[in-house]
Amino acid sequence: MRKRSCWIVSLALLAGALVACSSDNDTFSKLRLGIYIDNSTHQDATLASAMNSASPGVFCHIGYEASSRSFVFSSNQGGSSRSRLNAKEMEMGLFSRIGMNNGVIVGYGNLSTTDTGGYIFYAFDAQCPNCFNYYATPMKSYPLTMTAAGLAVCAHCKRQYNMNTGGNCINDSGKGLIRYRATTTGALGYLVVN
């Protein structure tokens, strides 16, 4: 009886360890960005369209332009804009790391839903995960371009990634898009990417 109890306890511990190992560690980047944008102060329509859960499939590329101290936004639906950082954002330095090489793409996927039926909010790096090497010297940029259908395309390797389903590579083998943890409080609310 005692031997059987030891086996049951051992199996329970092993099962717990396996469940603990199957976390989000391989899904999300280990690089922490710390992007915080208060769109209630910026009132940027390009960014708001991607942060609106009622418009899934709209994605916004976010970059930073040092010369004008501005966020630069461009949508996969054709819109683009820029918004100067306010004093609080400059002081906090929350713009200093925007992706691997100055670019993050955010938006709700239109082909993926949560357990409660809502759409999933994604944040992807704007560099091709199969071509870009963060540690290369000199660092070469392999930016992704967005299509209206919600695809991110690399001009170098020609891979296509479906942002609506989590960034999987759809036309070749290879890694999916690099994802970051992200949340939004709505179109004219807060965006946090870390």
Image (spheres, helix red, strand yellow):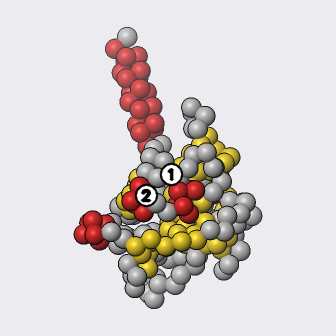
- Vertical placement of 24 versus 46: above or below? above
Viewer-closest of 80 and 128? 80
Q: Is residue 12 visible?
A: yes
What residue is at 68 percent from the left and 78 percent from the top?
A: 155
Q: Which residue is mark 2?
A: 39
What residue is at 57 percent from the left and 33 percent from the top?
A: 115
**Type of amino acid under label 1:** Ala
Q: Residues within 10 Å of mark 2 (few under 14, many from 20)?
A: many
Give percent across and percent down for residue 74. Answer: 57, 69
Asked whether the beta carbons under mark 1 and mark 2 sit within 8 Å of each other, the answer is yes
Image disc number at residue 167: none
Q: Residue furthest bottom?
A: 138
Q: Regarding mark 1 in the picture, which secondary structure is present there? A: loop
- Vertical placement of 74 versus 1: above or below? below
Q: Residues within 10 Å of mark 1 (few under 14, many from 20)?
A: many
Q: Which residue is mark 1?
A: 187
Give percent across and percent down for residue 162. Answer: 67, 58
Viewer-closest of 23 and 146? 146
What residue is at 70 percent from the left and 66 percent from the top?
A: 147
**Which quadrant holds residue 131?**
bottom right
Q: Is residue 167 visible?
A: no
Q: Regarding mark 2 in the picture, which secondary structure is present there? A: helix
